[in-house]
Image (cartoon, helix red, strand yellow):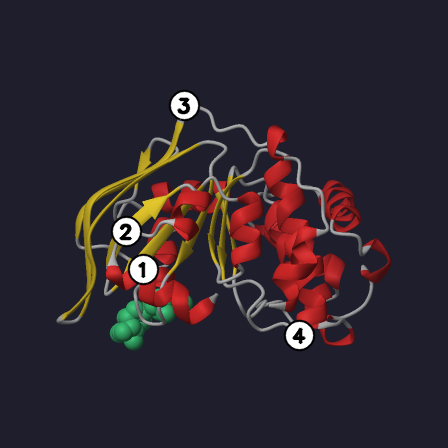
Amino acid sequence: TMSDAAQQDRNVNRAAMQVTDEVAIEISAMNKWYGTFHVLRDINLTVNRGERIVICGPSGSGKSTLIRCINRLEEHQSGRIIVDGTELSSDLKNIDKIRSEVGMCFQHFNLFPHLTILENCTLAPIWVRKTPKKDAEETAMHFLKKVKIPEQAHKYPGQLSGGQQQRVAIARSLCMKPRIMLFDEPTSALDPEMIKEVLDTMIELAEEGMTMLCVTHEMGFAQAVANRVIFMDQGQIVEQNEPKAFFNNPQSERTKLFLSQIL
Ligand code: ADP
Ligand code: MG
């Protein structure tokens, strides 16, 4: 695709992306149902700090549900999910802790349309973290510079392009100083010419050592940035491997079929 091609001309500093042996997320024997529908089946997944994991798979395979379970936007029914040493349970105190350590970026940016870009970025730090307004604004400007749109701070989301809005959404997450970032198809609602600017922002995060789980079909991004690609189908992790082996030598028929459809 065009965006994949655009990706190759960026020099990605993989040497800066160090995987540590410290565990960031541990999921074991995890199952989830929507009513009677068994949407996630026996998920086992350990993510170390510094990993960049790309999750792909057909529509409806449970990718979003898995991502959403990790910050407790969805509840699992059996097995364990441990994030940064905290087990996800019905204890609300844990949920607050998880939400502040795990940032999330969605396909639809979910910015508040009636708040300025700056206000979108300072809302949670001020109200959830009790950060003084001035400090929150300084932090917000820092991250808006980082995603290269500080000049948009006093505009409203509707005045920005899709790519700019998604970069605001990333900056807004970063303002909470997360240690893990989850992305759920962050570029799939964007026009091709805006995909690259969002992927570049994500690459920079990876180069700074952020632990990232990204649901995306941007296979150029996967090849350039991921240390591991996971393929899901029908609620299961069917296959996972480092990118080269995953793309050049897929093992299961389901993975082969999926790759033949998207590459
Ligand atoms: P993906 O992100 O891989 O497309 P999802 O995790 O969104 O998959 O969905 C997995 C399956 O669960 C789909 O069959 C979807 O229809 C179903 N599903 C998703 N959300 C809900 C929900 N809130 N209630 C019931 N079924 C759901
Ligand atoms: Mg999805």
Gap in Å between the C-alphas at discs 2 and 4? Answer: 33 Å
Query: What's the mark number on residue 21?
Result: 3
Which quarter of the picture shows residue 18?
top right
Q: Is residue 225 visible?
A: yes
Disc with the residue nearer the chain's start (2 vs 4): 4
Residue 145 drawn above or below residue 162: above
Which of the two discs, 2 and 4, sits closer to the camera?
A: 2
Count of numbered tags? 4
Disc with the residue nearer the chain's start (1 vs 3): 3
Q: Secondary structure at mark 3?
A: loop
Which of the two discs, 1 and 3, sits closer to the camera?
A: 1
Q: Secondary structure at mark 4?
A: loop
Which of the two discs, 2 and 3, sits closer to the camera?
A: 2
Q: Amino acid at mark 3?
A: Asp
Residue under pointer 1: 255
Gap in Å between the C-alphas at discs 3 and 4? Answer: 38 Å
Q: Amino acid at mark 4?
A: Asp
Query: What's the mark number on residue 191?
Result: 4
Residue 78 drawn above or below residue 3: above
Query: What's the mark number on residue 251?
Result: 2
Query: In which of the image's four quarters is ligand 2 placed?
Result: bottom left
15 left or right of 86? right
Q: Amino acid at mark 2?
A: Gln
Q: Secondary structure at mark 2?
A: loop
Pointer 2 residue Cβ closer than 8 Å to ligand 1: no
Q: Is residue 166 visible?
A: no
Q: Amino acid at mark 1?
A: Thr
- Where residue 101 appears, x then y in whole percent? 48, 40
- Where residue 156 appears, x then y in whole percent? 76, 70
Q: Which residue is painted at 41% across and 54% down in the image?
A: 55
Residue 144 drawn above or below residue 59: above
Mark 1 nearby-residue class (10 Å; few <14, some 14–19, many ≥20) = many
